[in-house]
Image (tube, rainbow, N blue to C red):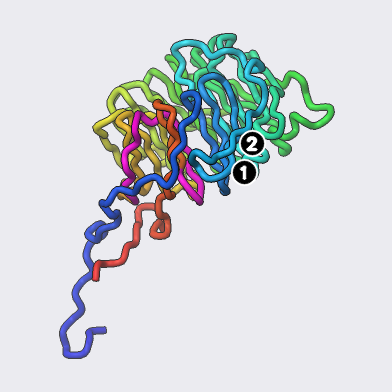
Amino acid sequence: PPPRGGRPAPPPPPLGAWPICDPTPVRPVGALRVPSVPAALHSGGDDSFLLLDMERQLTLYRGPVGEGARASAIGDVVALPAFAPGVTIARAVCLAATDGQPSKAWLASGGHWDGSLCLSTAHGGGGLRLRLAVHSETVTCVALSRCARYVLSGSLDATALLWDFGRAGLAGLAAPGAEASPRPSHVLRGHGGDVLCVAVSSVLRVCAVASRDGHACLYLLRDGRRVRTFTSPDATPIDAVLLSDAGYVLLSSSAATALHLFALNGQRVWSARLDGGVSCLSLSPCHNALLLGLDTGDVLAWALFDRTPLITYEACPGPVVCLAVSEAHLLVATSTRHVLKYPPPPQAGLLTPGLVVARPPR
């Protein structure tokens, strides 16, 4: 209704007219220098995180991120085969936990010289549980579902293997009577080049496989059937892929410094080009915010559905190699052996796909 005085209320400003992101850079709240270049991170909800470095050493850090953090080595370095040259290790290893905490974390690692896929416990005393030598070439990428039931591996042999470990998930490997040499449930074919990146979603019941030929394919977890093919608009190799539980597929091409978001039905939602190459990608726990780590050291946080900037982070002291985000904080690792802790991106305004609600300035 019109306010008193008979003057009609002004129309609301269009979406995006109100400032969503404070331009003031947010500085890290903690910083730690580690002995070797990180390859993978896993952030728990408390002040602890797991780190795998290029020397194949898995370490659990407890306490605030800084000089006072307590480090505990997990497992034996020599248990994992050496990494092969020419492989992007950050894509070939994956840390995941069934309960979101490092107390029940698992490590799936590829990139080894013998072409094997290794599954190891990343908690307690650690240890290699399985070494799966099924691929005929080096494993280039690995993905774990959040329920730790499905493991997906891609290789230079232009195939991807999907492993289903049942309702018990990877935890069943430690149970008495576990199968010593499981076989993949499905062999995913259809690519004309090396498989560079994979993703799996137990919520959508699909997995994504992308390769050097510039195509990404969706397969059903149930029977391994290919149901959709996405083509990079730049006709360049796809070296990173993400699956959002909201029903979206994100493709990244470092050669074209471009990002492309597609819906599951194949429609392109948006495309973006960046000044620097994208070295790592991650989604927030709610899958509505996209975190980008760049070769320039910048860290970007966008609303996934419309690229609205959510927060401005201060640049890192070196190129970003991996990152991990939880509801409590954002951890960023660089090639200069730094691990930085930032506040997580704000997500209170993210309501539905494509809609960001903000309060007008007073």
Front residue of this view, candidates 296 and 244: 296
Is residue 324 inside the magenta stretch?
Answer: yes
Q: Indicate the secondary structure of the residue bearing disc 2.
A: strand
Q: Magenta residues?
A: 311-330
Q: Which residue is mark 1?
A: 101
Residue 138, percent across and down? 53, 12
Q: Quadrant of residue 215?
A: top left
Q: Quadrant of the C terminus?
A: bottom left
The reply to whether residue 50 is in sight is yes
Residue shown at 49%/13% (left/top)?
Answer: 156
Q: Is residue 237 left or right of residue 107?
A: left
Front residue of this view, candidates 117 and 156: 117
Q: Quadrant of residue 347?
A: bottom left
Q: Which residue is mark 2?
A: 105
Residue 322, percent across and down? 44, 32
Residue shown at 21%/90% (left/top)?
Answer: 4
Q: Are marks 2 and 1 in contact (CB under 8 Å)?
A: yes
| Outermost residue toward the bottom in this view | 5
Give neighbour class at mark 1: few <14, some 14-19, many 20+ (Cα, 10 Å).
some
Q: Given the image, on which type of amino acid does mark 1 rest?
A: Gln
Give neighbour class at mark 2: few <14, some 14-19, many 20+ (Cα, 10 Å).
many
Is residue 349 inside the magenta stretch?
Answer: no
The reply to whether residue 242 is in sight is no
Give how far apart the Cα atoms at labels 2 and 1 are: 7 Å
Q: Quadrant of residue 125?
A: top right
